[in-house]
Amino acid sequence: MRLPLIAPADLTDAQKPLYEDMKAGIATNFNDFKVLADNGALMGPWNPWLHEPVIGKAVWDLTKAMSMQATLPDAPRQIAILVTGAHFDAAYEIYAHIAIAEREKMSAARLSALCANIKPTDLDPPESVAYDVAFALVNGGVLPEPCYALAVETFGQHGANELIYLVGLYALVSMTLNGFNVPVPERD
């Protein structure tokens, strides 16, 4: 970890409101995996965001909008997030979203394929579309028209937009995690 964890007692006045907002949002939406150190410090991408509270707040606001107001079904969301995390080999992102996918009963074989950058063979049509869109986007260039059109047909215009933004958000999360070498906690 390139940035030290910030214990609540060590937060600056600029960091305190962001810490409280992130801690409350995490407790509501990201509770399938370890996010707090023993001293109450936020781990994962939240710690680097706390180090730069102006930027961190902007990223956190986007994360909240994408999580708390999501309209995409969760299985396609998790597939898109795992495709993105696996592409960038973002260990904490993979750790966290495997935990969510396991709670939702995603099979070990499917998770293994996703983490190996392989399209699972058991995806339903919406999941397959989410995989294809995420895979195409993280590999660069313009999203091919058939992928885009199928995303709009499958999820509606708003859902297709949300899927594209979701991949972009988790590419940013991946860069945060990899840039600051954020470690993965031990699994219980």
Image: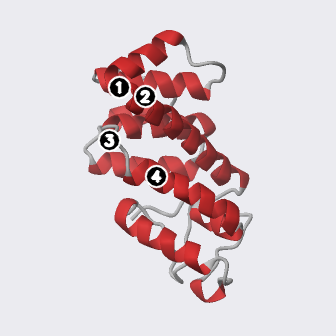
Please say if the residues under marks 2 and 1 sit with CB atoms less than 8 Å apart: yes
Mark 2 is on which residue type?
A: Ala
Q: Which residue carries the number 3 mark?
A: 74
- Under circle 1, the secondary element is helix
Q: Which mark is residue 65?
A: 4
Q: Residue drawn at (43%, 65%), measured in percent from left and top?
A: 26
Q: Is residue 91 visible?
A: yes
- Residue drawn at x 72%, y 52% is 179
Classed neighbour count for the residue bearing mark 2: other residues with Cα under 10 Å, few (<14), some (14–19), many (≥20): many
Q: Is disc 4 surrounded by few (<14), some (14 to 19) or many (20+) residues within 10 Å? A: few
Real-space Cα separation, disc 3 to disc 4, in angstroms? 15 Å
The numbered mark at residue 156 is 1
Where in the figure is residue 47, as x and y percent of width and height?
Answer: 62, 67
Q: Is residue 183 visible?
A: no
Please tell me whether mark 4 sits on a helix, a strand or a loop.
helix
Q: Amino acid at mark 4?
A: Ala
Quarter holding the N terminus is bottom right
Depicted 78 relative to depicted 141: above or below: below
Q: CA distance from mark 2 to mark 4?
A: 15 Å
Residue extending farthest to the top is: 146
Give residue 53's position: percent from left, percent from top.
67, 68
- Look at mark 2 in the image and give the residue it sits on: 160
| Residues at discs 2 and 4 in contact (Cβ within 8 Å) | no
